[in-house]
Image: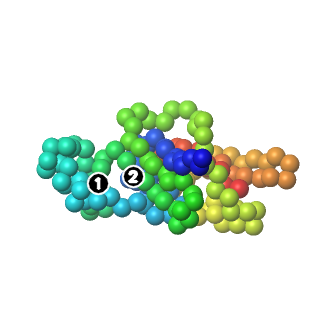
Amino acid sequence: MATDIQIVIDSADPHGQADWWAEVLGWQVEPQDEAFIRRMVTTGAATEADTTTHRGALVWRSGAAITSPDPDRPRVLFQLVPEAKTVKNRVHLDVHVGADGREDEVGRLLGLGATELHRASQGPFEWVTLADPEGNEFCVA
């Protein structure tokens, strides 16, 4: 039996995080159905407080997702949470670009708003640990 998974990342700004990570990974922000959202509010199944406007479109306040062009990769959902990140991630993403592309990719990500935390190696493997705009750690290898 195959099991589908989704990666969920807690976020203070799920729409901003989805935009940022879509740019990082070359993925797409999953569109939200504005007509459906309006219909849910109109019928009382949701309230205006459940929505927000992002980049000129009505969206659900509670989350935004990104998807890969490769349908075999899991969807990543950024979920609104009230508390800020306070400790190191227990799970993180690794962005594999290879040794030849690592420095260029780190430079690109720093230009997008990432913060470099540290560099490390283990045997022949090297990586750079960065933080996204909300402080979530991830590695570029």
Residue 59 is labelled as 1
Extreme right residue here? 123
Q: Which residue is mark 2?
A: 64
Q: Nearer the viewer, residue 2 or 33?
A: 2
- Nearest to N terminus: mark 2 or mark 1: 1
Q: Is 135 situated above or below 104?
A: above
Q: Residue at x 48, y 59 (%)?
A: 67
Residue 89 placement (x, y as % from top left): 58, 37
Residue 51 falls left or right of residue 108:
left
Examine the rendering and report whether any part of residue 20 can be seen.
Answer: no
Q: Please tell me whether mark 2 sits on a helix, a strand or a loop.
A: strand
Residue 51 falls left or right of residue 114:
left
Examine the rendering and report whether any part of residue 85 can be seen.
Answer: yes
Q: Are marks 2 and 1 in contact (CB under 8 Å)?
A: yes
**For the residue marked with disc 1, what is the amino acid?**
Val
Q: Please tell me whether mark 1 sits on a helix, a strand or a loop.
A: strand
Q: Residue at x 86, y 48 (%)?
A: 123
Q: Nearer the viewer, residue 136 or 2?
A: 2
